[in-house]
Amino acid sequence: MINLKDLKRISEYVWEIPSTYRQDMRVPVRLFATQKLLEEVMKDKSLEQAVNAATLPGLVGYVMVMPDMHQGYGFPIGGVAATRYPDGVISPGVIGYDINCGVRLLASQISYDQAEPFLDTLASVLNRCCPSGVGEAGALKVSEAELDQVCREGARWALKKGYATEEDLRRTEEGGRLEGADPSKVSKRAKERGRPQLGSLGAGNHFIEVDRIDQVFDPDAAQRMGLVMGNLVVQVHCGSRGFGHQVCTDYVDDFQAAVRRYHIELPDRELVCAPLNSPEGINYLAAMRCAANYAFANRQVLAHNIRGAFEEVFAGKGLNWQLHQVYDIAHNMGKIETHLVDGKMIKVCVHRKGATRAFGPGSPELPPEYQSIGQPVLVPGSMGTCSWVLVGTQASMSQSFGSTCHGAGRMMSRHEAKRQVQGATLKRELENQGIQIRAGSLSGLAEEAPKAYKDVDSVVQTVSGAGIARKVARLVPVAVIKG
Amino acid sequence: MKNRIIFSKSHYNACLALFLEVQIWVILNLMKLKAGFSERAHTADWELEVWAPDFAGLLEQAARGMFAISGTRLEEGPRESQILHLNADDPESLLVKFLNELLLLSEQKHLGFDHFNFVLDGNHLNASIEGAPIRSLDKEIKAVTYHNLSIRETKTGLQVNIVFDV
């Protein structure tokens, strides 16, 4: 069990577990947290999991953990690990099962005051238009050939089908399409699972949330993003559904033998990995990119349906119902990027699990309109509190491989949340706060109760204090649709 | 005259029957204790502790536990059966493969299972499983993970902790 005394304090918001803490560590672990947040996470196995990940071959710099960290499987949620390209490793378990689980933010020109009388209807129409929950009822069903196109083209496939605009793609991480995706590296089983689920939200912590812009901290950046105080915005949180889960399952299974072949010793079998330049590594990267592209297309189809819902509710009422995309970010992904390591710019594979890319101003990957402000970072909180829009900074580039936090982060088990919270009572309480709730399962709602999560404001204050993101706007929920 | 308790043959038989009944109840409950599952605290996902006298029992309890934590309820009426043939390099991998097969059948064929027969030959499994269409399901399990997966020997058999990504 790691204690506070095992950690070295680097600054108010940065802590380190030195590589001498355990003999098999290859690099130190850097934690972005306040002492209070750290004391909270020491109740679970987050830090132990970060130390385990620090044993991966080919790591450079530090294994980083963001302040929304919590125990996951293999690698903690909130983890960032970069391995040297091409001889370092890639690990499917470190990236996770919901490949390219991410968040999209759409902004409206309708104020909360104008929308307030219609919010109940809006929540119901969104719930009807956006399939959610377990299974695939209501989602698009694509042929195998078409699924291969989705794998290769991602959100660009959606553009060809009329579900997207060029601006949507420009304002999506990687333009909504990772190059190098190869559908022949994806199993038949994954394709069978993916074909009937495109354009669906899924269950768990996935959601669509309508928010009111409550505070603006950086008027210039907010203006660039089209965020106006008091207006409505919509967040979509979902990933690659059964398709991505199966890709990860297949390769975690496959890599169990690969670690023996490459004589890699690991403290946890979920961390199985293979060199990026090995046949196994190359195949997984190609398959993972297919799942990432599937997720980009999935959120794009959902965004199209959300636009339809806004039109249905607000058309004919003298309001501009158009929604423009602010940005779409991934938070479970392995990406080949170039970063400064030991004074040299080198290519690395950045594994982010429950962590968001947060590129600073001037990064060539950003669209022209965001070049001067940095990449928008979307940080959803719990459904009863608030969410944040941030931007990446130069410090995130130099300190955290261009990464920052991804959410509030859980602090209570689902079991405990269900024990403490009644789904029906929670629904009533949230509705009394003026938040419309549509949930597929009341027990699922209880699991996601606000008290099960950390204080998102503290998480954001930490990344902001550490300099690895900058505050732009704060959002408060007015309608939540959950599977 | 002192009261005398007359212990007749019928009394003796009744006591014997009661004694046997208690013994059977104790044995049955001990057997139940030897196989089962319980949910363990996990911050983000679900963790099950599973125990059984042998590996076949462990597979069955893990399957029952997985369907229980996901809130799977089956239709009454016609039953469905499936045969699975699975190979793996070690028992832990076989356990993960078996549970992942059940998840897939649950997602694709909307079937849940509550009756299991296993024939094990090393790390090769022939499973005959029986169940019914799913009437309702509370929670989707994304995958069965290998996180800290290690089957341990105990005084009463085998035990394993399984983490599910949800």
Image (cartoon, coloured by chain):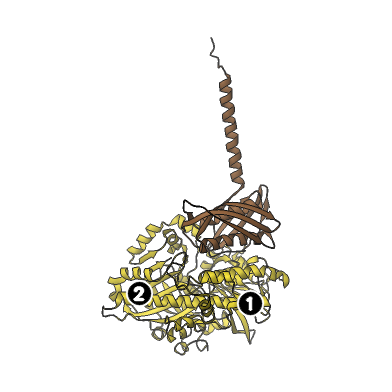
Chain colours: A yellow, B brown
**Looking at the picture, which amino acid does disc 1 mark?**
Asn
Nearer the observer, A456 or A364 = A364
The image position of residue A305, as x and y in percent, is: 39, 75
Nearer the observer, B133 or A24 = B133
* Quadrant of res A316: bottom left
Q: Which mark is residue A283?
A: 1
Which residue, given by chain and number where applicable, does mark 2 sit on?
A309
Element marked by disc 2: helix
Q: CA distance from mark 2 to mark 1?
A: 39 Å
**Looking at the picture, which amino acid does disc 2 mark?**
Ala
Q: Is residue B40 visible?
A: no
- Name the chain under label 2: A
Asked whether disc 2 touches disc 1, contact meaning CB atoms under 8 Å apart, the reply is: no
Q: Which mark is residue B127?
A: none
Nearer the observer, A35 or A197 = A197
Residue at the location (60% across, 48% down)?
A: B35
